[in-house]
Image (cartoon, helix red, strand yellow):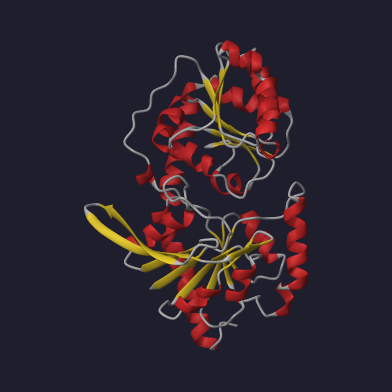
Amino acid sequence: MKILIVRAFPDKLDLESYNVQEIGLAKALVERGNQCDIVLYNGRESSKKEKYTFQKDGKEYAFWIYRMKGIALFKNGFMPSVKQILDPYDVIQVHEYDQIMSWMLYTGKKKPVIIYHGPYYHSYTRGYNLKCKIFDGLFLHRKKYQDVWAVTKSRMAESFLQGKGFKKTVSVGVGINPDNFPPYKLQKSERPQILYVGKIEDRRNVYFLVEVYRRLRDKVKGLQLVLIGNGEEKYKTAFLSFIKNELESGDIIYQEKMPQKELPKVYGSAEVFVFTSNYEIFGMVLLEAMYFGVPVVSSMNGGASMLIEDGENGYVLEKFEAEEWEKKIESILIDKKRRELMGQKGKMKVLKSFTWSSLAEKFEGVYRKAIDDFERNGDGA
């Protein structure tokens, strides 16, 4: 198949420093014998086409990245020249049902189009909820869309789209690319460690995380909390002041940034990965932790709903009750055999079902259904 992935989000991406999901999927699709190119937003700079090459198992592969000139408006990226390159492709993949550029393509009836969608309704995301309400009123119901195929990053996102009238949905998740990580040797630290990787912000509930750690510290000798992540300066400064004593004593270790090549060492040192986020579309750090065999204790979110089998390869908690989080984390910390078994099960699940290579086949299946529907009906309706 010839596939074009259109990322309409109005952000200019540095492929060297940003883990772009579209790149991971495109590589997996190309390895399977497809042609798969990507459209990325390029702001007001001139459009350009660049060749992306990579090697796998001694073979060299390549695809094209179109960086297209566009404008940004209310977190929507508009790239009018996209329509000029659609003809050679069998199917188009757009991202998020509520991006206006995506809507123009999936209701345009010029080509088979599928949506890859991640967000879902949550009381915490008031801004996104309002945006969707406005989008639905202005755009969604103006053209027929119910029979457009949609692939979602979680079952929560799938239910969200079904509630808006999308009839053809399938939840597949997000993938990880093991090739991104160099060979590594897991080595535990001298002190038991709880690990958190992510932004230092209100959405990630980092103050609650510290509260849980302080409760555990009195029970588990030598326990450290390792925090890796940046954040808005004012919030981050206040938070670091809040944990000042633990930083000075070495009970909490904080690092603002971590090169990707160093991540295996960080994950490998941890006994448990704790994720207290109020809301998460998926959470690549959950995938990474499980890939490195680290048991996860997480809030309920998009990624947790797909990855974690409660009590088997980690725990999912619906509420932010410190005592309950303390109990679950402690049960992992004090039982080495249970901890290792949970980690092994988590790693096996990721390798079996959540690499881009394993997900690419599922995407291909949806592409074929979209193409068949389009050919049968003449306009994809």
Vertical order, 360 against 148 (above or below): above
Q: Give the image quarter of residue 130.
A: bottom right
Q: Nearer the viewer, residue 241 or 305?
A: 241
Q: Nearer the viewer, residue 273 or 180?
A: 180
Q: How many marks?
A: 0
Vertical order, 344 against 352 (above or below): above
Relative to 278, 247 lies left or right = left
From the top left corner, tell me how far across and down residue 370 is, in percent: 51, 76
Q: Quadrant of the N terminus?
A: bottom left
Residue at horizontal 67 percent and vertical 45 percent from the top: 279
Relative to 273, 65 lies left or right = left
Vertical order, 126 against 311 (above or below): below
Residue closest to the far front? 45
From the top left corner, tell me how far across and down residue 8 is, in percent: 56, 64
Q: Nearer the viewer, residue 22 or 293?
A: 22
Residue at horizontal 54 percent and vertical 19 percent from the top: 334
From the top left corner, tell me how far across and down residue 354 is, in percent: 46, 50
Vertical order, 238 against 356 (above or below): above
From the top left corner, tell me how far across and down residue 379 is, in percent: 56, 86
Relative to 331, 92 lies left or right = left
